[in-house]
Every structure is written in structure tokens, then in C-alpha cells.
Amino acid sequence: MIARRDLLVAGAVGGAALVLPAPNEAVALPNETTVVPGARSVGNFQVSTLDPTTIPKYVTDLVIPPVMPKARHSERHGIDTYVIGVRQFSQQVLPPTLPSTTVWGYGSLGDSSTFNYPSFTIEAKTDRPVRVTWVNDLVDSQGRFLPHLLAVDPTLHWANPPGGTSGRDSRPTFTSTPGPYTGPVPIVTHLHGGHSTEESDGYTEAWYLPRANNIPAGFATVGSFYDEFREKFADGHGLKWDPGTATFQYANDQRASTLWFHDHTLGLTRLNVYAGPAGFYLLRGGDGDLPKGALPGPAPAFGDRPGTRYHEIPLAIQDRSFNSDGSLFYPTSREFFDGFAGPYIPTTDVPPIWNPEFFANTMVVNGRTWPKLEVEPRRYRLRFLNGCNARFLILKIADSPTVRPARSAVPFWQIGNEGGFLPAPVRLERLLLANAERADVIVDFTGIPEGTELYLINEGSDEPFGRGEPGVAFPVADPATTGQVMKFVVGPLASKDTSVPPDRLRLPMIRPLGSSSVTRRLSLNEANSTNPLVPPGTPVQNLLGTVDSAGNPVLLEWDDPVTENPRLNATETWELYNFTVDAHPIHIHEVAFEVVNRQPFTGSPTPPESWERGFKDTVIAYPGEITRVKARFDHPGRFVWHCHIVEHEDNEMMRPLQIGGRRTEGH
């Protein structure tokens, strides 16, 4: 059986997902070939049917997401109000010469033209509340529920609507290996980076089904915490949620920063987000210490005229694979990952559909494959988001799309991360972004001749990330496909640039946290199958846990009793011990934390990276190291912390977090 770190997944060779042996390592393949609907196979390995090398690059203009319209009569009582649904629709993600793609996306229920992948952007102001009614509108024109676009593995610990009230949010048992779940899809939206109360956080067990007319009898229509949070919201705001909806209120009492929203349903996040529902939430108002016009702009605003030139642009980078009919490709069998063709649950402990990670073969920016953007020879503010399921990105602006190692043609000046502005701008030749991390950067095209073509490339890997130098510690992404992201073409200067050069910017002051009163030792773990029918080293779960007094990991599942229960308003240091061979992006809900340091298990501490200063909400925990973060927990209630490789999150690498008291139940 092939070692996990030797896997090359979708997009390795001409779009074919191959599992290759390590040097001098033999691999045996079964004789039979299995063909699954919508895909073809190489040997026994299912792959997408659209070869990414045949997709034309840089023929489609970058889409800059417009601003999400507010609901009518929105600004009553000083609250910006939205009614936003999730729907299924067709979008031209691939170039126009290829078929369109059925996706899901958010949009204003008052205007069907606003539904898009990714979503239109919510613009918010610090200390001005935003209230959003999130609607699960995954129904057809007859009001019947729409099944998932992708294969749902019902053997995980997941929302499990078929289990009814008593069996929801559980890991079902089976007497034979089940096929994919095809029922109504639960959703719940999380504002990633939000400083939210528990009922508005998008808790993973507060999901809800659409208000469809054919929900099967006996199905649970809401998650375990939905009713409790609905009542709490009604008590606090005088509004009770309608079926198929949840209304959340965001106080925005935090630093201006780049936030984003996405689905967070238990055991379904990887699939729901891959289908499309995600968008930017830009919180402004922390620019008070900066002179007006110091940063590049404008950004999109509601009511802009067509053709308006923007110099502040959000960029959501994701990897996707496609079938020849334009549909999204995502594995329908565990066999895709490592060639193990079963037996699966219940004969063994291997889930039949879940893949431990997924690396797609095509790069998508703001919902378009390999787009291009004409820029003026001036400064731009780019807000990057790594929205990939499992892929770490190492971004660079180069003058060639395929030459590796690539020379940096234009540097990044990073001015902010997930928690807002940094203490000072940081000049970087390349930008490392783990899943869900954001980087607020200035790119200066001043003085570059008109007609110059520059390329945003990716020197991350097409496999799980550990750490180290691209091309030395690990192979870089395929230069023909996943190593390219988008193209910049320098055009004429249309207006004077009044922004301040980034090396002269003075960013707003940061008030650091005080000393912590508690230190917690927590573990990051991977569990392999122990079944004798399964090859050794086959991963079946990723888990969080604690560390005992001897320094050994204590592995905990989602449903185990809560172990992280800070006192209200306590400041704590969390030590994340990574016992796995991969780096993990760890996200803690509700808080913005400081990265304190990192320390090898047998070494000395090192300070955080220059771009990790200030506050963050997601941190890279490297293998064989202790990553220390410090946070103040100032909202009581139930939240979560988890790995943001969403395949990990969906199979036990998430734990409940109870602030200001302990609940006795495990979930």
C-alpha cells in the first residue's frame, strides 16, 4: 500500500488522478476497472473527465464580486438587514467555449440576479450591527428538496437527518455498506472571523433543512441546538426564526478585517462549501488612524456604474475539478484516495466515500477558472482568501507562468491578516496561505510598462503540506495547471494614484492581550485503521484531543465530553501539539488570538512569523511542533475549534468549546 505522503491526487498528470508509488516501491493494482457515473477511471482510480490542460487559460476576465444588497427598510434601529438564501443554479465557471456548471451560492432573496458563486460581498462597519436571515432555499420550482450535487457519506458522525430527533447529529450504524445519502441537504452559515454570540455563530449542530413539501416522514428538520438558539435569539431580539431559516445578528464589535462566510454543517462542510456557498464579509472602520485615501481604492459599492475601476479587490482562490459536461467533480469513493476498494463500514472501519484530503486539478478565482485582470500601473489592495478544501497556497507574482523556480517580479506588501491590520507593513516575495487564512496586501504595479503580463502562481504542493522550501522539501504544484492561478495585464493609467507607498504606511495601533491565567495542552492526531482486512497506515479519522501529564496525546471525538471550557472573560494560552506528519490550519471560533510562538518537541521556541503579528483566527500548526496561541474568551456559550482542512473537520477533527460553564452532554 502506498505511503500517504507519496500520493499525488487529481491533476498530477494531464488531469488524471494517479496514485504513484514512491521510488523503488512496487504497487499492485486490481485487474478489474470500475466506471462510476460522470467520471472515468485510470486503472481503478476514478478521475474527473475534463483534462485541465485542455481548459483555455486567461481568456475570461476576473469577476470582482459586487456588494450584496440589503433588505428593504434595512436600516431601522441602526441595523443593516439582509435576507440571503442558498440556491442551486448554473454558472459559467469554465471559459465560455466549455459547458456551464451547476453550483450552489448565496444571494439576496429579493433579487435573483444576485445569486453567484462566490457570493456578493457583505459590506459592514465596526460597531454597527448586521442582521442576516439565512434561508435554505435548496428546492426546485415545485418546492421539492434538491439532493446534494456531490456524494454524501452517511457513515460519518454527521447531521444525519434520517435519524430523526433521537438520531440526528450522530454516527449511524449499518448492517451493510450504504450508498450516498440523497435526501434534503442541511445547512448553517458561519461568519468566519466573527465575534459572535453562540446563537449567531453558525454552530455545526444548529443546521436546518429547506422548507420543502416532500421532506420524508421521520426526518429531523433541524439540528440538536437549533431550537435552543432560536428561542435565545427570540428572547434577545424579539424575532423567532421561520422554518427553513435562521436569523443571526453580528455586533461587529471588533477590528476592521477581512471575514468570510460559509456553510458549517456537521459532517457536510467539505461538500457544501465545495458546491459553492461562500462569500466575503468586509468589516470597515478601523482605518481611523490612516489618512483618507492612504490605501488603494475604491472597492465595489452598491449602485456603482458599470465599468467602474476598482483598486481594492477581494480574491477567493479555490481548486476545483470538472467533468466534461461542466459538472463539479468530487470523489464518490474512498478508493479515489489510496486505491483501497473495501470492504468498508461496517465490515471494517473505513468510510466508503469520505476522502482524507482532496486536491483538485483546476484553479478558480472568484468563481472563474484561470482569469485575467487588467491593472493600471499603480497600487492595488488585494484581499486574498485561501478557500481550498485541503490545499495550502504559496503565492508569488512572476513574469512567467511555468518557469520554476520562479523569480518574484513584484513583491507583496502585507498590511493585514485575519484579525485586521498588522503592526506595520511586511514586504514578502511570496505569500503562504493555509486553508481559510486571509492576507490583506498591497501590490504596486507603478512603473511597469503597459502591455506587461504578470502571473499569480502557486508554489505550494499538490499533496498535504508539511513545511519547508518549495521544490526542495516538497514538489511544487504542476506548473501547467495548479501552479498557475491568474494573470495580470498592465494597461494604461486611467487616474492618479493618491495612495501612500506601502513602506511609508503607518498602520493603526494594536492593543495586545494581557497575561494568560490558564495554559491548555491540546493535541492534533491522525487515526489509522486497526482492522486486519485493511492495509496498515490507512487513515480513517483525524482527531483533536488533549495531552496527558506524560506528554502523550489523548484522542477525543466530537461527541466526547467537553474539555475546553474557559471561564468567561478569561485569557488563556493554548498549546497545540501536532502529532501528525502534516501541517493543520487550526481555527478557533468567536475569538481573535495572538500567535505566541512555536517550539519543536525537542527544541527551543521561535517567534511568530512577521505576517502573523497582531491578531489571527486561523494558525498553521506544523508537524512535530507545539504552536502556542493566546486568546480572551468574552462570549459565553457553545462554540467550536477545528482544523480547516475541511475533509479533516468533517471526520472528527473538530471539538466543542464551552465558554463560561460546562454542559454535561458530549455534543
Image (spheres, rainbow, N blue to C red):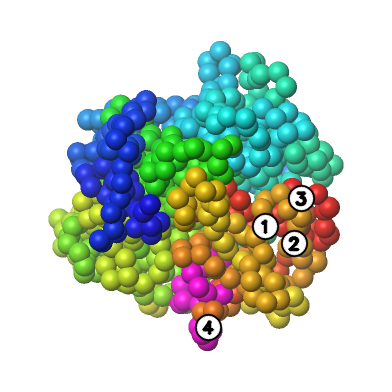
Note whether residue 221 is visible.
no
Return the residue at label 1.
556
Kindly check if marks 3 and 1 are in contact, taking CB atoms under 8 A apart as contact: no
Indicate yes or no whether the magenta region holds residue 604: yes
Q: Secondary structure at mark 3?
A: loop
Q: Residue furthest bottom?
A: 604
Q: CA distance from mark 2 to mark 3?
A: 10 Å
Task: Point out the stretch of residues depicted in magenta.
Answer: 603-626
Return the residue at label 4.
602
Which of pointers 3 and 1 lies earlier in the amino acid sequence?
Answer: 1
Answer above or below: position of 141 versus 10: above
Camera-side residue: 541 or 640?
541
Q: Which mark is residue 220?
A: none
Going by the numbered disc 3, the residue's amino acid type is Gly
Residue at the spot 80% in from the left edge and 65% down from the top edge: 568
Going by the numbered disc 4, the residue's amino acid type is Thr
